[in-house]
Amino acid sequence: MFLFCFILLALITKTKVSGAAGMLVKIIKPIIKNINTMKKRNFEVVWNRGHSLIGCHQVTSLTIALMTFIKFKFYNLLTLVLLLVITSCGSSKPPLRAKLVNETPTSTVFSPDGKWVAAGVWGGVRVWNVDSEEAKDYKTKLRNETPKYVTFSPDGKRIAAGSWGAVRVWDLKSAELKDYPVGMINETPTHVFFSPDGTWMATGIFGAVRTWDLATGAHRDYPMKMINETPQMIAISADGKTIATGVFGGVMKWEFKGFDN
């Protein structure tokens, strides 16, 4: 570490050194000279390298922007340090990649059998195979929306998430989808819950808990204590006969009444 700092100091101050340190300076100096004469190319290299490393892109982008518009006294040193930093960040690169390098997937969840992991990403739900790390995307209704909550059905064959004006359910294998509309067209449900037997699901909408029959699409609403409340987390009993959610001042529960087909 001392030798490294000594060499950097010699490069910055242009001090002549001898011995092993002098040889290293002679090797590194042409490299720095080349970097200094090819700034534009270096910016592109650092930019691309930094943006390919999750967790380092913000620092890299900001530093490059400063380097581009501000004339640093120690430009060469800053360039070398930046390259070392973003290279070291490569070791922390996540194996399951999102669609965009600057996004953080939401609501990561495993399938019941543990073979798949899903999360909300830009414009859809991304599902990764845990073993192969291969990914498959399931598109939302809008290209610019990111599902806040993703869930697997109890049998692991379907995934569901709130999408603009509805709850969207995808078949994991075929990617076929079906939308279950909510009461307001501009409302996006945040959380979705499958029943224990996987035949129906529930979500919170404006003023109620709404349940759907997955086969027919029929729905039934369970009104809240206050009409302007939107329930977030919903509990379904293990036998599927009772629904509960937190409301203003307490918890409400209802007996599940099925659907009128």
Image (cartoon, helix red, strand yellow):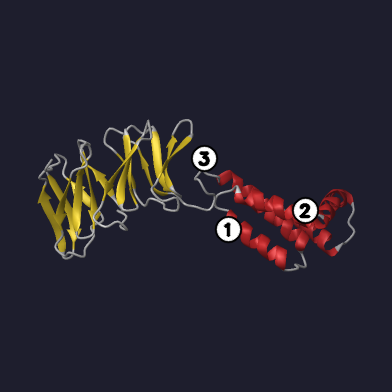
Tell me the crowding category of disc 2: few under 14, some 14 to 19, or many 20 or more residues within 10 angstroms, Cα based.
Answer: few
Question: Mark 3 or mark 1, which is nearer the start of the sequence?
Answer: 1
Which of 57 and 173 lies nearest the eye of the viewer? 173
Residue drawn where x is 19% and y is 47% of the image: 211
Q: Is mark 1 on a helix, strand or loop?
A: helix
Q: Which secondary structure, mark 2?
A: helix
Quarter of the image that includes the C terminus = top left
Circle 3: residue type: Pro
Residues at marks 2 and 3, CA–CA distance in whole angstroms = 35 Å
Q: Where 69 falls versus 178 (above or below)?
A: below
Disc 2/disc 1 C-alpha distance (Å): 31 Å
Q: Residues within 10 Å of mark 3 (few under 14, many from 20)?
A: few
Mark 1, other Cα within 10 Å: few <14 / some 14–19 / many ≥20 = few
Q: Which mark is residue 3?
A: 2
9 sits left or right of 191 in the view? right
Against 46, residue 239 (above or below) is above
What is the C-alpha distance between the residues marked 1 and 3? Answer: 19 Å
Measured as percent of width and height from the top left, residue 175 is found at 38, 35
Q: Which of 261 and 65 is in front in this view?
A: 261
In the image, residue 249 sits, relative to residue 114, either above or below, namely: below
Please state the horizontal and vertical placement of residue 148, each as a whole percent of the image. 36, 52
Which numbered disc, 2 or 1, marks the residue that appears first in the sequence?
A: 2
